[in-house]
Image (cartoon, grey):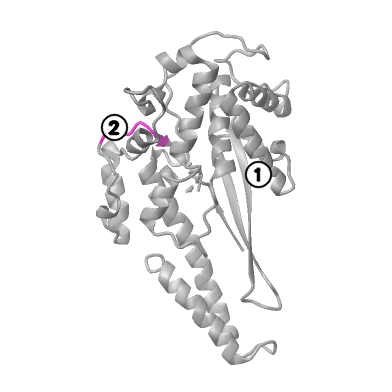
Amino acid sequence: MSVLFKPLILFSFSLLISSVSAKSFNRRARVIHIDVQENWDKSWYNSREGKEKSLEKVLQTLATSKTGRLIIARSTEKAKSVGASLRDVIDVGSSSLTDTTLIRKFSPDNPSEIHYQTKSKVYLNKGLSFQDAVLDLAHELTHYSYREPFNPYVTKFTVDQFVSSVIEGRGGEVDAYLIECRVLKELRPSNFKTSSNCKNVVDPQTGNFSKSLGVARFYDVGEYSENFEEIINKYGWEKSKFPKLGKGEALYISSAYGLPYPVAALSEFTTIMGKACENDYNRLVMMREGMGTSSRSPASLSFGKFKNLYASYKTRCSQFRP
């Protein structure tokens, strides 16, 4: 039994909340050649060369940035830890996101023994320009290498903690955006100065990147405030749990949901928890039907396992029961 979620990091869950990227650069047509003789504004994906060579050029270019080299090294170590190469976890897709699959494995001899396994894959949007592909890859590799996957069966996240994790947690959307802005500044300083929204996360006093400014801007929902309130009202959550929510223009939009990140994170949380709670409900039904019929364990032991799972289910799934 498994739960597939796209961290917005989509989490694109990317959360995910499907788990989730800030694609808000203003593009201007400029021609510039880099070491691999690619045009920054031309599509990064060359069908004649194929995806392997196309991806390799993007990686090579990202590696010419100091920040890019660091994030590539970190991602390589993460891939190595699960017996894979960096290239094994990067592929071409219709959008840029980090996909994470959570798998639950039950022991046939001991139903209470559960093993969890996660598998992550980074996808790079096939339709991007070369510059945007380099920036998107830096963004998604930040999610891949730093963000811890959300396990809805054991992680005791409240909805506000989940939203906070997606936006401002380690390897979350603000961290990933700051990384891609650093890469842009290192590789194309003229574009960084004149044609990107990265200036929104630069402290005007010091000229340094500011995570606090990034957090403030990423919580802005603007005209989408009604969407946010509609979701929290549906599930009985209090708006006061989200004190950082802002009314400013929503400049940073999740590519997975087409919504500002606070709204996208709410949507991802409800999707993930809804599926996980449905799975646990079905398991409870099967355990109840099987109690007293198994020759492998006493009925009292089976009831104890049922009672423990039900208590966990009741705590986590009050708003998501079938």
318 and 207: which is toward the camera: 207
Q: Main secondary structure of the magenta part?
A: loop
Q: Amino acid at mark 2?
A: Glu
Q: Magenta segment, which residues? A: 248-253
Residue at 46% of width from left, 32% of height from top? 177
Q: Which quadrant is home to the N terminus?
A: bottom right
- Residue 105's place in the image compared with 121, above or below, is below
Residue at 64% of width from left, 33% of height from top? 72
Check residue 65 for magenta coloring: no
Specify whether residue 255 is in view: no
- Badge 2 or badge 1: first in the primary sequence: 1
Check residue 251 for magenta coloring: yes
Q: Which mark is residue 249?
A: 2
Q: Which mark is residue 78?
A: 1
Mark 2: secondary structure: loop
Give the Cα distance between marks 2 and 1: 36 Å
Within-10-Å neighbours for mark 1: few <14, some 14–19, many 20+: some
- Residue 306's place in the image compared with 200, above or below, is below
Q: Which mark is residue 7?
A: none
Residue at 53% of width from left, 19% of height from top? 186
Going by the picture, which residue comes out furthest to the front? 206
Q: Which quadrant is home to the C terminus?
A: bottom left
Horizontal relation, residue 107 to residue 272: left or right: right
